[in-house]
Image (spheres, rainbow, N blue to C red):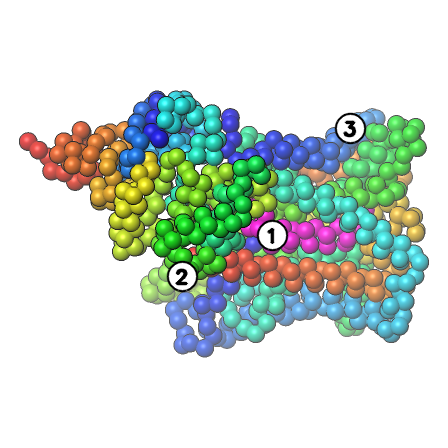
Amino acid sequence: MKRILPGFPLTFGLSVVYLTLIVLIPFAALAAKAFSGSWHHLWEAVTSARVVASYKLSFGVSLLASLINGVFGFITAWVLTRYQFPGRRVLDGLVDLPFALPTAVAGIALTSLYAPNGWIGAPLAKIGVAAAFNRLGILIALVFIGFPFVVRTLQPVILSLSEEVEEAAALLGATRLQTFFRVIFPATLPALLTGITLSFGRAVGEYGSIVFISGNLPFKTEITPLLIVAKLEQYDYQGAAGIGLVMLLLSLVILGLVNTFQWWNQQRVGRVA
Amino acid sequence: MSIRVEELSKAYGKHAALHNTTLEVCTGKLVALLGPSGSGKTTLLRLIAGLETPNAGRVFFHGEEVTEKSAYERRAGFVFQHYALFQHMTVFDNIAFGLEVRPRATRPSKAQIRDRVQELLKLIQLEAFGKRYPAQLSGGQRQRVALARALAIDPSVLLLDEPFGALDAKVRKELRAWLRRFHDETHITSLFVTHDQEEAFEVADEVVILNEGSIQQIGSPHGIRKDPANVFVQDFLGIEYQI
Amino acid sequence: MAGAIQDLTASRGLARRPQRATEERPLVRWLLIAISVGFFAGFLLLPLVAVFVEGFRRGAALYFQSFSDGVSLEAMKLTLITAGIAVPCNTVFGVAAAWAITRFEFRGKQLFTTLIDLPLWISPVIGGLIYVLLFGSQGVLGPWLQQHHWRIIYNTPGIVLATVFVTFPFVARSLIPLMQAQGLAEEEAALTLGARGWQVFLRVTLPKIKWGLLYGVILCNARAMGEFGAVSVVSGHIRGLTNTVPLQIEILYNEYAFAAAFALASLLSFLALITLAIKGYVEWRALQDLKASQL
């Protein structure tokens, strides 16, 4: 097929070669290593009690963090899109802070804040709440890094909500609260779910911001990425590759979920428009 | 420079935009491609320009086959519906573009380029606007700049895609008349696409009516009105059924 | 760039008009604002503030001294080298991929686009893992590399590779929606006027995408300099040799040299803030361009 605009062979070729070298070949190595050696060892590595505990931890806490982000992210997206108040622009710009800030910086900052002698940790310790070196600490860190995803996914959707639909509801006698739950919220649901899933995907793989605040106690606060590092240090390449594959598969499932929600979102927007 | 297309077909996926179309445009004529949206008129224009490649069929300019030639090699001046002016360049630079990108061997000197651009600015009655940016112009002014830009390369044919579609009624009428006058002076073979029958009938020497990818009728404005070829043409033009 | 279009809402919801049917009561509004600002300030902003406060805790003199420590200097050098290689490579890739995706139709485009987003979906540790599995001493190419006395893992090349992997989406992701929204009419016009490939790109496309490109490069750079997880896996933490700034921060922190750790952290935080500022500017410019072309 003759292409009108120039440059296809060059740009496509370059991109494909680059992706092959940087992504495909290394991932082939991942698969190769996972299946080198005995099945038994692979299975052991991937399903040992300690590793399974880490799956549960990563999965569970990430889910909770994403839901929390769903709530506060929605409120923030709403407030940023619909209201005017001093500092709105600044707030809007800074929403991306957790995204732009290096994970290690976030990690040590959060740890120092919530450690027993930290600015927030100290008052909390007084009422008997420990917010660092335990699951709560991990939760806090994951809420931090996942926050931008929900807000940024919701903003364009809230912006595109038709004001006329809300006016119609009001004219028909609905209170503002009713309008919100029956009209507005359902319209934003696909986007909200997309944002929560994105936040979840990011949280599950997070490393740098967690390893400082978690304390890394086996069976208690060990996240799965840490176990990969541990396996590598023991030169158990197959084990590390195995766990890596499991995480990869989980990421693909999450990716599939997001695509589904996004597709659902498209359908909705198409219908309303 | 005459234009001839033979059995031209173009499909996008399963959708046949243009079907086995044959058409001849004689040198120096101003021809309108008229039809409802989806009729294939823009596709036909772009195929003639070389902005699309056909699935089947051939294109000839002045008897010479140009099917395999690029848009530039065909020396077709093209005016886009939404002008496609280079937003980041001044009016002057927009018009000069075609001359400045010529290979060194055939590139005119700076002075020659300047003269040519000035000449064209005068032609489109925008002499003082050389340093302005497209964003600072009105729709009608932008359209004229787009035309001047296409003319700068001394095209053998002029192709216009709904040139006045994005303008309001009054400006449209003025530019229509202007185009007709311009064509009368330069006699450059021109083909323009429109869905507005009043426009087609007012401006063109000949009108080609398309529907759903094929030509329904070709003729002079008067001839078509008098003798519509089929029910579609009658309906489209709002002609009463002649018993 | 969703934020760009957002400012069009300035015409909505002016706080001092009488209540309209589609507005909440002022009390509700201010409560929601308070919740989100409170959450934001307390949760998100506070860590940033903590970085700077902790960094200066032992005084300004010690703050600046942290940077002149030999090991820290080596770390900064390595970070600069890494970013200096990773960012240009990823920029070239990003531009090429964006051009291929937004200007042409081809089979497998969806897969291609998804593949570009891949590093954002997986743990950075995996980003490092795959290179260890490929080039490590027990990796697929391990024995072959040892034969030739080449070391990639626990050495600079490994760090560069891991950084390239983790940051390659950013330039492409910034350019693709931009180039898609801009459409290719101007490029087609340039073609009809006789411009050839490179001329079209340099004279027509590049001026149009320059702000999006700038933002993509800046973001790629910020992420490259701040990458921790992937680099941690491939570096071996050899002090003075394979430590980047984020890794050095980790080491300092674990050794309880808090002030020094936060001093270095504050550098990266500055970078993050500059990145956000540039993002804000780019979006503002994009909005201006959008408004102008709609006259």
Residue name at image x 84 percent, y 34 percent: C135
Q: Looking at the magenta stretch, what is its main secondary structure?
A: helix
Residue that badge 1 annotates: C210
Q: Are marks 1 and 2 on the same chain?
A: no
Q: Are marks 1 and 2 in contact (CB under 8 Å)?
A: no
Residue that badge 2 annotates: A163
Q: Are marks 3 and 1 in contact (CB under 8 Å)?
A: no
Instruction: Say what amino acid the circle numbered 3 marks.
Output: Ala
- The answer to whether A56 is drawn above or below residue B38 in the figure is below
Residue that badge 3 annotates: A32
At which x and y percent is residue A166? 39, 61
Q: Is residue B26 magenta?
A: no
Instruction: Choose mark 1 or mark 2, whichever is in front.
Output: 1
Instruction: Say what amino acid the circle numbered 2 marks.
Output: Glu
Q: CA distance from mark 1 to mark 2?
A: 35 Å
| Mark 2: few/some/many CA within 10 Å (<14, 14-19, 20+) | few
Instruction: Say what amino acid the circle numbered 1 marks.
Output: Lys
Return the residue nearer the eye: A122 or B126: B126
Which stretch is magenta? C205-231
Q: CA distance from mark 2 to mark 3?
A: 55 Å
At which x and y percent is residue B120? 40, 49
- The answer to whether A111 is drawn above or below residue A36 in the figure is below
The answer to which quarter of the image holds residue A184 is bottom left
At which x and y percent is residue B149? 43, 46
Q: Is residue C208 magenta?
A: yes
Element assignment for label 2:
helix
